[in-house]
Image (spheres, grey):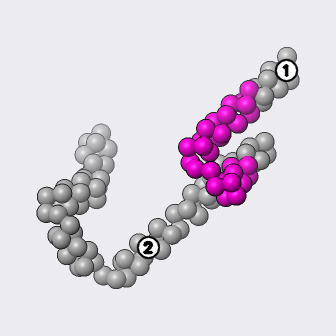
Amino acid sequence: VMMNLVASQIVPFITYFLPAFFCVVFGAPFMDRMLAIVPEQVIGILKLIGAMVPALGLAMLMNMMNKRSTIPFFFMGFVLAAYLKLDIIALAILGAAFGMLHLLYTRGRRTEENA
């Protein structure tokens, strides 16, 4: 229990709280000096990892969508985002509406098949 409670809070404290605290207390010039200490290779690796995050998210999304009935919703959302330039709020509202319709129609089919 102590390992889960204490140890799991040490890493977020070091990685999130301390940098934010030092940035607020000492200001931007201090953080610029600290960033200058970090080797250029580490900065390059972090940039590469940051560029890979969208691809990883897309792969995770595709992995979760293993039902044939949900794949068209993925492609509809992609088309709406890429070609119609809809923002995230509009896509979320449309996605929720399509998801509710999908749930209603598939739930109705399941109860009819089981009856």
- Kindly state the secondary structure of the residue where label 2 is placed: helix
Q: Are marks 2 and 1 in contact (CB under 8 Å)?
A: no
**Could you tell me which residue is drawn at 37 percent across and 77 percent down?**
43
> In this picture, is 32 found above or below 112?
below
Q: Give me the C-alpha separation between circle 2 and circle 1.
A: 52 Å
- Please state the horizontal and vertical placement of residue 64, each as a whole percent of the image: 65, 48
Residue 70 is left or right of residue 30, and the answer is right
* Quadrant for the N terminus in the image: top left
The residue beneath circle 2 is: 47
- Please state the horizontal and vertical placement of residue 25, each as a whole percent of the image: 13, 58
Is 47 inside the magenta-drawn segment? no
Q: Amino acid at mark 2?
A: Lys
Residue 60 is left or right of residue 68, and the answer is left
The residue beneath circle 1 is: 112
Q: Amino acid at mark 1?
A: Glu
**Could you tell me which residue is drawn at 17 percent across and 60 percent down?**
22
The crowd level at tag 2 (other Cα within 10 Å; few <14, some 14-19, many 20+) is few
The crowd level at tag 1 (other Cα within 10 Å; few <14, some 14-19, many 20+) is few
Question: Given this view, does label 2 or label 1 mark the residue nearer the observer?
Answer: 2
